Amino acid sequence: MSILIKGGRVVTATDDYVADVYVTDEQIDQVGRSLEVDADRVIDAAGKYVLPGCIDPHTHLDMPFGGTVTIDDFESGHASAAFGGTTCHVDFCIQGKGQTFGEALDTWHAKANGKALIDYGFHIAVTDLLAGGTLEELASLPEQGITSYKLFMAYKNVLQVDDLTLFQAMQVAAGSGALVMVHAENGDAIDVLVREALGRGETAPIHHALTRPPELEGEATNRAIQLARIAGSPLYVVHVTCKEAVEPIRRARELGWDVWGETCTQYFFRSIDDLARPGFDGAKYVYSPPARDASNHAVLWDAVRTDALSAISTDHCAFLWDGQKTLGKDDFTKIPNGAPGLEDRLVMIHHFGVNEGRIGLNRMVDLLATQPAKLFGLYPRKGTIAPGADGDIVIFDPAKEHTLGAASHHSKADYNLYEGMTVTGAPELTMVRGNVIVEGGQLVAEPGVGQFVKRARFGEALSS
Ligand SMILES: [Zn+2]
């Protein structure tokens, strides 16, 4: 199947021009003016943007957590992603206590097998280096295309690792060519604050945010940066939410250290006030780190504009409000942490970032596609539009009106963080390696078309 996309405005992280794009054998073969090629299908993209498929480096599909399992599996999660213009994601494979990394990866590969609609990779979440995986096994994972190690500095007694494990994993990464990712919050201090709050009878959703103050994110971020500096590993701080965490990342980057940070869509739009909504509605906004004081919205826009933060992910970790979030009706610590968002990133960042003049169109592509590809060993096969890259393309109509909400989204979640908000600009067609996945508001591909991607080591190119 070959496709010629005619006359669209090709926008990459660096360029913006009108051209034709010819995709054949799953790859972009030619980009140029008035291409003379025979294609099985010709798509008129006049007046539309032709964007590289977005890459989401932070998702949790089919993940056991908080006494339940995230509601989107690889099929519904991937459908949701494709409708939102995301063509590849890197999900977290979580090592269970006592499990080897190989056992955990077998479990995650099985979850995706036969269900995938977009391409995917896995980060390994290291939770146990004593009874489970060994340092040697961790060092060998890049050979299987698992080139990023995630460590949780929070979620005490569940996912949290101590500094010994964190530092050892960093030392392994320095030698194996992996990128270290951290969830940076001080889990020990949070644990104390949570027990004190419960002791005072404070059980409502708002106390989730009040027991995880921004200083504890700032402290853990700085600790991880300094440890990575000593270990010699590159570091990527996930879901940065506040000034306290942006500042140490910005400083490290100004010093030329190998430190990067991401934020997520929701941190630009939601605030601590959402957790105080009446009834039990606040539980919809319970995720970690929590939504912050709204003064941080401008801090984050400034950070992504100036490259203090280099990527925007979703941390899609969807639970039903009715039946899953309600597990914590009488105790905020039992509310499963996480929210949906895989589908909403591109339209929200385009509208509130680009349309409202906070970032440019090239920077949007950089944050949503090119930087995630470069940092996670997918570039230049993914993350740009160029001959030889995968035919992962989004045709985006900048004039299309789109209203977000649970009734129209494709996640199984029964609520949307941006319910009722209307944006201008939305994807019209999404293709993965030249296979059209979504078109005209319909899913037109069968599960199984998505493939596992063996990612390159940190800093290395992924060839096609
Ligand atoms: Zn996450």
Image (cartoon, rainbow, N blue to C red):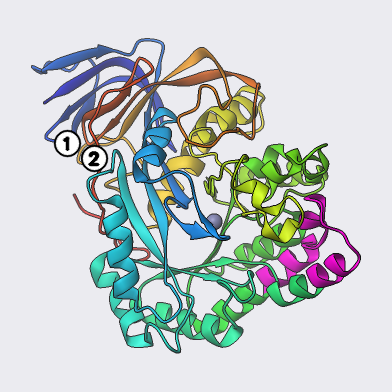
Displayed quadrant of residue 75? top left
- Cα separation, mark 1 vs mark 2, equals 6 Å
> Is 199 left, or right, of 232 in this rendering?
right
Q: Residue at x 72, y 39 (%)?
A: 270
Q: Is residue 209 magenta?
A: yes
Quadrant assignment for ligand 1 = bottom right
**Residue hosting label 1:** 26
> Is 89 left, or right, of 190 in this rendering?
left
Q: Residue at x 74, y 56 (%)?
A: 332
* Number of on-image labels: 2
Residue 410 lies, in percent from the top left, at: 45, 30
Residue 313 lies, in percent from the top left, at: 52, 46
Dot 1: what SS? loop
Contact, CB < 8 Å: mark 1 with mark 2?
yes
Q: Residue at x 68, y 67 (%)?
A: 185
Q: Is residue 376 magenta?
A: no
Residue 446 lies, in percent from the top left, at: 22, 32
> What is the magenta segment's predominant secondary structure?
helix
**Residue hosting label 2:** 390
Q: Residue at x 54, y 22 (%)?
A: 407
Comparing 420 with 98, the one in front is 98
Position of 438 relative to 45 (above/below): below
> Is 388 left, or right, of 362 in this rendering?
left
- What are the residue bounds of the magenta stretch? 193-222
Q: Amino acid at mark 2?
A: Asp
Residue 461 is at least partly visible in this image: no
Position of 313 relative to 210 (above/below): above
> Is 377 left, or right, of 27 in this rendering?
right
Q: Amino acid at mark 1?
A: Glu
